Image: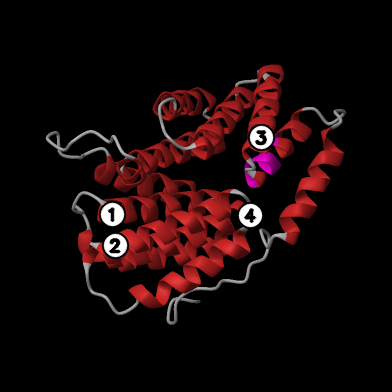
Amino acid sequence: MAEQAWASARWREAVGHGSRGAVARGRAVLDELDPALRHSGDVDARAMRSLALSTRASWLRQAGRHDFAAGLDGRAAVEVADQFPSPRPGWARAAVGDALVGLAADNLGLGRFDSSSRLLIRAGDVLVGRGENEPASESVDDWLVDGRVVLRWHWVNAENALYRGDADTGRQWAERAANLAAECPSTHHKVKTRLIVAAAMAAEGDSAAATERAREVVEDASTAGLLPLQWAGLQMVVALSPAGAELARLNDVTAKLRESGFFRVGISCPAGTAG
């Protein structure tokens, strides 16, 4: 129990570094965590190994390297393969959900829309079919292993629809995500959800509202120190309003992320999992 608490705390620390764009620091934390978990056959330890791989994959995906991310997400799924198709509640289910949602996002970024859809269906079977008698998520840890993954599933379903040109379905998924994010304890996830909503607005042709929402994302992300989301929001603003003044700011944020290792492919991961 103590080891699991320590491992989950270190994983949360790494995730926090990544959300601020300090990916090199996040990788360093996971590099310390990996050896402690490597030889354990415990379900929760394997779940943490899987989550660490999914986290590394998410950093690559944010930087546009869906090809590299897919390899790590695949290995994340292998770590918890024995938990398919009905993982036990807690970290195991979070790991299975994260791996499947990550793979769906990777395939979406690589243009494999049908593969992405199939993975989202599998993830939905895992995440939405929770036991009715399970307690509601009240603590931060509960949200990390439950609500967080369900919210990510909604994000990628919205993106899948938008990539396919189905703006109406994309908006519906984005609205559901916004409802879920309203009470979540993570500023990062609230801001990211608003970015998804802005993308749905743009897809429906409401460029003015989308630009305004994206600008709100930029300011909220800046206030919270969430550099990658600030960068993503600025990219959307510049795309929707090329004559705006945000291009110089985008270039500045891009330079800061480059310095922090955000765009560095360098896949540091446990022995036997690189490739």
What's the residue at 55%, 27% (across, down)?
197
**Pointer 4 local density, CA inside 10 Å: few below 14, some 14–19, many at least 20:** some
Q: Secondary structure at mark 4?
A: loop
In this rendering, the count of numbered labels is 4
- Circle 1 SS class: helix
Pointer 3 residue: 223
Point out residue 172 in the picture as x, y percentages from the top left corner.
Answer: 45, 23
Image coordinates for residue 261, horizontal then vertical, percent: 68, 63
Query: How many residues crowd around disc 3 within 10 Å: few (fewer than 14), some, or many (20 or more)?
Result: few
Tags 1 and 2 touching, CB below 8 Å: yes
Which residue position is annotated with label 2? Answer: 4
> Which range of residues does the magenta coloring cover?
228-233
Q: Which residue is mark 4?
A: 64
Residue 37 higher or lower than 53, as above or below: below
Q: Residue at x 31, y 39 (%)?
A: 139
**47 over 179 or under it: above or below:** below
